[in-house]
Image (cartoon, grey):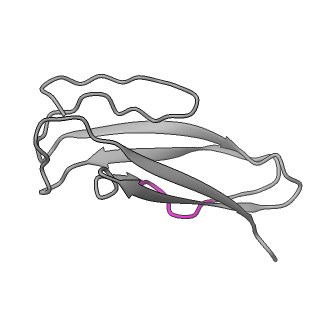
């Protein structure tokens, strides 16, 4: 959390960079998901760590049909829970489960 905004991209991490600790500050990242299975799947994301109350996903439990691809959008927003300046971490666990018809 700083007075400037920056973004870093890696294959296994979502970095929101530096974000000013203001109630209207927001940062977002998108992750491409592709269903390579021959059956529909549901994607669930669970957050933990220091940032768990600040990060959401735009669509809860989206379903992807076989061969379908789409973006999962992660939004960081402080709201009224403003942090002090510093470095914060968290974890997003993504679960993929078969949709039974």
Q: Is residue 56 left or right of residue 94?
A: left
Q: Residue at x 19, y 34 (%)?
A: 1
17 to 83, vertically: above or below: above
Specify whether residue 26 is painted magenta: no
Query: Is 81 placed above or below 19 here?
Result: below
Side of 85 where 50 appears, left or right? right
x then y, percent, for residue 24 = 15, 44
Q: How many marks?
A: 0
Where is residue 66 shown, x and y percent of the image?
A: 82, 53
Magenta highlight range: 57-62
Residue lying at the far bottom in this picture: please name it: 101
53 lies left or right of 94? left
Task: Tell me what residue is drawn at x 57 percent, y 64 percent.
Answer: 61
Q: Position of residue 93 (x, y in %)?
A: 54, 54
Q: Which image quarter holds the C terminus?
A: bottom right
Q: Nearer the viewer, residue 99 or 49?
A: 49
Which residue is depicted at the point 47% across and 24% down?
9
Image x and y of residue 19, in percent? 21, 33
Query: Compared with residue 54, is residue 63 higher up or lower down, i.e. above or below?
Result: below
Report which quarter residue 17 is drawn in.
top left
Q: Main secondary structure of the magenta part?
A: loop
């Amino acid at each position: 959390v700083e007075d400037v905004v920056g973004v870093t991209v890696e294959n296994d991490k979502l970095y929101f960079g530096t974000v000013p600790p203001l109630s209207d500050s927001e940062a977002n990242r998108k992750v491409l998901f592709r269903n390579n299975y021959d059956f529909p799947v549901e994607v669930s994301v669970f957050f933990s760590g220091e940032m768990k109350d600040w990060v959401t996903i735009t669509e809860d439990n989206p379903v992807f049909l076989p061969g379908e691809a789409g973006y999962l959008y992660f939004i960081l927003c402080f709201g009224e829970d403003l942090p002090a300046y510093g470095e914060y971490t968290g974890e997003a666990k993504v679960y993929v489960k078969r949709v039974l018809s």
